[in-house]
Image: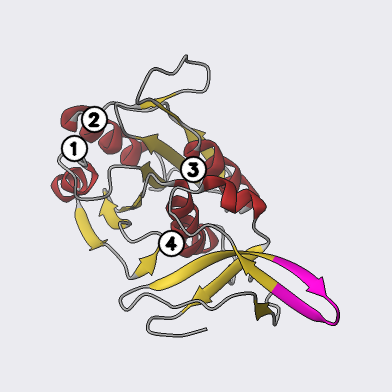
Amino acid sequence: MRNVIIPQIIGNFGNITGTEIIEPTETPKEGDIIESNSRMFENMVKVEGGVAFRFPPIEDDYDKIKEKVAAASKNYDFVIVNAGSSAGTEDFTVHVLRELGTVIVHGVAIKPGKPVILAIVNDKPVIGLPGYPVSAYIDFKNFVSPVLAMYSDQKACKKETAVDAVISKRLVSSLKHKEYVRVKVGCVGNKIIAAPLARGAGAAMSLVRADGFCVISREAKV
């Protein structure tokens, strides 16, 4: 039986992995990264009708991550594991999920956001999101939001508003990936102009500054 917090609302677990990740209240040392993604996820879950339960970061320890994910999948309807989804030596998420359940997808052809993990543990959806903030946001919208809509009995996810705009400079897409380019939008004369912002997966402020995304299909030229 699912652990439904209130009718049509799901419980959500946010788990952040990484020894270098610290809370905002801690004093950072060289190499430390102040954790922010889980706060973003928490609020995105609330906006989309869910109830979010956020957990503090976990160090890069296989057994500790396994223990937390196993417990979360038993106690909550939907588990989000943030970071550790790539293929580095201390990226344990996919290995933990394979041991605990079934990994359906590991890696998708979108950029930023390639190393997402879609899995099932204890008959619950578990999604591993990348640690880079832009990648995490894009994967949340593409993969977490549809599951939230299903759990809350929404007929469909809310669609974003689309506008016809002129790109301010030529963009060449990746040969292998659909790309989400952050853009700043404004009016110049009688035209709407979309100016591309920084394209890096870790350029967090580009999300703050952006008015939207220009989504470029593979092998397309704009």
The region drawn magenta spans 185-193
Q: Furthest-front residue in view?
A: 169
Mark 1 is surrounded, within 10 Å at the Cα level, by few (under 14), some (14 to 19) or many (20 or more) other residues, namely: some
* Between discs 2 and 1, the one toward the N terminus: 2
* Between discs 2 and 4, the one toward the N terminus: 2
Q: Is residue 164 visible?
A: yes
Q: Position of residue 57 (x, y in %)?
A: 38, 28
Q: Furthest-top residue in view?
A: 27
Amino acid type at circle 4 is Phe
The residue singled out by tag 4 in the image is: 143
Tell me: 212 left or right of 53: right
The residue singled out by tag 1 in the image is: 90
Most common secondary structure along the magenta stretch = strand
The stretch drawn in magenta includes residue 123: no
Q: Position of residue 152 (x, y in %)?
A: 56, 58
Question: Helix, strand, or loop for circle 4?
Answer: helix
Question: Helix, strand, or loop for circle 1?
Answer: loop
Q: How far apart, in angstroms, are the residues tagged by discs 2 and 4?
A: 25 Å
Amino acid type at circle 2 is Asp
The residue singled out by tag 3 in the image is: 11
Question: Helix, strand, or loop for circle 2?
Answer: loop
* Between discs 3 and 4, the one toward the N terminus: 3
Q: Residue at x 28, y 42 (%)?
A: 84
The residue singled out by tag 2 in the image is: 60
Amino acid type at circle 3 is Gly
* Between discs 1 and 3, the one toward the N terminus: 3
